[in-house]
Image (tube, rainbow, N blue to C red):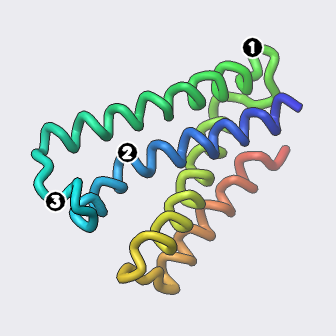
Amino acid sequence: MKGLRTVTFLFISNTFMTFAWYGHLKFKDYSWGKNLSLIAIILISWGLAFFEYLFQVPANEGGFKENGGPFTLVELKTIQEAITLTVFMIFTTLLFKNEKLGWNHLVGFGLIVLAVFVIFKKW
């Protein structure tokens, strides 16, 4: 159950972080965002990152093997990277329709998923 909670929290945290890192690129599409200063955009992004940390820290704290969780530090980082790319692909596909994911992107992301398998495989 701790593993599922960890992965769920990492998905939520990565969603907030993706919006903090890239969501501001869509602000200009809305009337309220057309004239925002860079400092305003940074402050909005920091606000979103706060919510990312509300989920990321408990995910890693509870998911870490030395704290009673099921994952090693390397496994946590690998899960986080795979989730980050998954969330990013969904985000890009839904919000940035002019961005096209090519075969090379999909192969690259697939190799990262393969890395998850390699890291979790007990050799």
Q: Which quadrant holds residue 8?
A: top right
Q: Which residue lies furthest to the right in this view?
A: 1
Circle 1 residues within 10 Å: few <14, some 14–19, many ≥20: few
The spot of residue 97 in percent (x, y) is 42, 80
* Residue name at image x 36 percent, y 82 percent: 98
Is residue 35 shown left or right of residue 73? left
Distance of mark 3 from mark 2, alpha carbons? Answer: 17 Å
As helix, strand or loop, the secondary structure at mark 3 comes to: loop
Circle 3 residues within 10 Å: few <14, some 14–19, many ≥20: few
The spot of residue 39 in percent (x, y) is 14, 38
Q: Which quadrant holds residue 72?
A: top right
Give the number of the disc on residue 67. 1
* Residue name at image x 57 percent, y 30 percent: 56
The spot of residue 42 in percent (x, y) is 22, 39
Is residue 84 shown left or right of residue 32? right
Give the number of the disc on residue 20. 2
The answer to which of 16 and 75 lies nearer the viewer is 16
Assess whether mark 2 and mark 1 are in contact (beta carbons under 8 angstroms): no
Pointer 3 or 2: first along the chain: 2
Is residue 62 shown left or right of residue 90? right
- For the image shown, how many numbered marks are present on the structure? 3
* Residue name at image x 56 percent, y 77 percent: 107
